[in-house]
Image (spheres, rainbow, N blue to C red):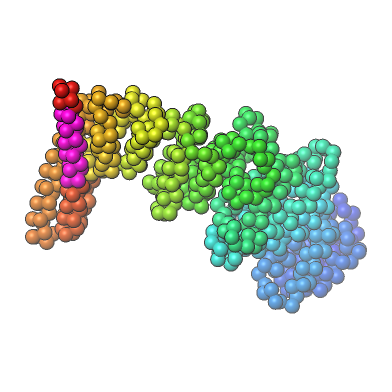
Amino acid sequence: MAMEELHSIIKRCQILEEQDFKEEDFGLFQLAGQRCIDEGHIDQLLEIIQNEENKVIIKNMGWNLVGPVVRYLLWNDKEHDKRKYYFLMLDLLVKLCNPKELLLGLLELIEEPSGKQISQIILLLLRPLQTVIQKLRNNKAYSVGLALSTLWSQLSLLPVPYSKEQIQADDYGLCQCCKALIEFTKPFVEDVIDNKESSMENEKLKDEILKFCFRSLKCPLLTAQFLEQSDDTGDDPLRCFASEIIGFLSAIGHPFLKMIFNHGRKKKTWDYLEFEEEEDKQLSDSMASLAYLVFVQGISIDQLPMVLSPSYLLQFNMGHIEVLLQRTEESVFSKGLYLLENGLLRIEDNSLLHQYLEIKSFLTVPQGLVKVMTLCPTETLRKKGLAMLQLYINKLDPQGKYTLFRCLLNTSNHSGVEAFIIQNIKNQIDMSLKRTYNKWFTGPQLISLLDLVLFLPEGAETDLLQNSDRIMASLNLLRYLVIKDNENDNQTGLWTELEKIENNFLKPLHTGLNMSKAHYEAEIKNSQEVQKSKDLCSITVGREEIPNMPPEMQLKVLHSALFTFDLIESVLARVEELIEIKTKSTSEENMG
């Protein structure tokens, strides 16, 4: 019945001129053709398509059969006997139908599926899509751009594999699609290369490929994890995809080296591209991804001239590192850590000039490292962030270290980080006293820095438990200064500021310790009474109420807090004892 209907429609259309085909004819042809495919009349359909007398009909209406054919190929078993005939029909339709209508039809089919079917339909239709675009005579650049944009939009919905096992399994087909997408794009890149004349159409084609490269650098390459260099990196599909994308950039006249030398100029070479507003904001992600691929993964690194100084390359990458560290995904901000390490290891200790800190990213990057150190749930990455901050400090010149310390003490808002900075200050003072005089960590400059260290933010009301790391580091620094710097020498300026330190730090700390110990001793007494009644209750630790804690655990927490206060108190007592001994000794010397 379906074949009879189709023959009837074809017989009627054969006597019509192409321009006389009606919309009704297209609809009837599509319905009858769909039913023929559903009923399995593939042989008769092939005869109709290959019949020279039906050439004009197939050219204008045949594209309506592509959808049913493609859906059959997707939904039916790969071992089905008739699959080869459906593939043949698809090839014939691509060859004979109107390429403009086919292009839109194929792209609609690519946009339809979700989940694992996304990769299946892309792998099925990439070659036909490439053939159709190559047949187009006009607006080829627009068609390439439309196709690449549609394909990328669908690929961006697929999860990016992150482990070696996931990459090899490639359950969602992303890796296969990346490989196939490169083969799809290559002929159009070659068109740009072969067309030596700077025609408008060629420039448009170049722009569309550039857009695609930038999109690919963001997704999937920004979040992609690459196999270790020691492994057979030639088998890493995502690394191969990255290498090809960077190769495309070079081929169309935008090599990475050109982007480096363009860095810092107000007008970028790609500013004229008509990106969507949201995409334009994401260009920074793409450039950061590209920097990581070149400098850390070493893709096309051999193209960089040796004349570029390590400090210039670090300056170039610092903005990209900032972008990476601002992201919350571990797979992305970890790349910022490795890109920073790559840049810093090229630079000698104490040689990074303090003037670089006038560049915004040179201060925001260490602040980003602080966030990694304090907020990242993965211990290895927290430790990596800490190591990178220390490495960064080591590379700065003395004034740079001084400036960074002031910045982080004012912005970190984390007792552990502040303790880390205070320990670094102590190390710099020690080097200045023992080795080379350094004005930034002695005298008036140091006193200005100590004002940020030797004080309690809220006086005696400061939460000592929450700030215990910082307080212990401050006391240890003060103890060191008292021991190492004699009152008569006063190299650090400590002794002229002693009264201020006592009023702003030592006395409020005494008061705060007495208040805190009294509070926690009262909490212990209360907890012991509750324990006798075997009820659950809440306690207040660090100004935060911890509800429904078993009494045994409450007591453990409270005793731990008291132990911390006792530790602070013992160091405080030792500092005050040393101050008394030093001042008494100096007084006796002066009297003698």
Question: Which SS type dominates the magenta stretch?
Answer: helix
The structure residue drawn at horizontal position 16% and vertical position 59%, both measured from the top left corner, is 552
What percent of the width, then of the height, locates residue 575? Answer: 20, 37
What percent of the width, then of the height, locates residue 458? Answer: 24, 33
| Magenta extent | 565-585
* 471 versus 41 height, above or below: above
* 338 versus 164 height, above or below: above
What percent of the width, then of the height, locates residue 433? Answer: 35, 32
The structure residue drawn at horizontal position 27% and vertical position 37%, both measured from the top left corner, is 480
The structure residue drawn at horizontal position 68% and vertical position 40%, both measured from the top left corner, is 305
Kindly indicate the quadrant of the structure image that contains residue 308: top right
**Residue lying at the far top of the rendered structure:** 591
Asked if the stretch drawn in magenta spans residue 220, the answer is: no
Residue 261 in view of the camera: yes
Kindly indicate the quadrant of the structure image that contains residue 27: bottom right
What percent of the width, then of the height, locates residue 65? Answer: 76, 63
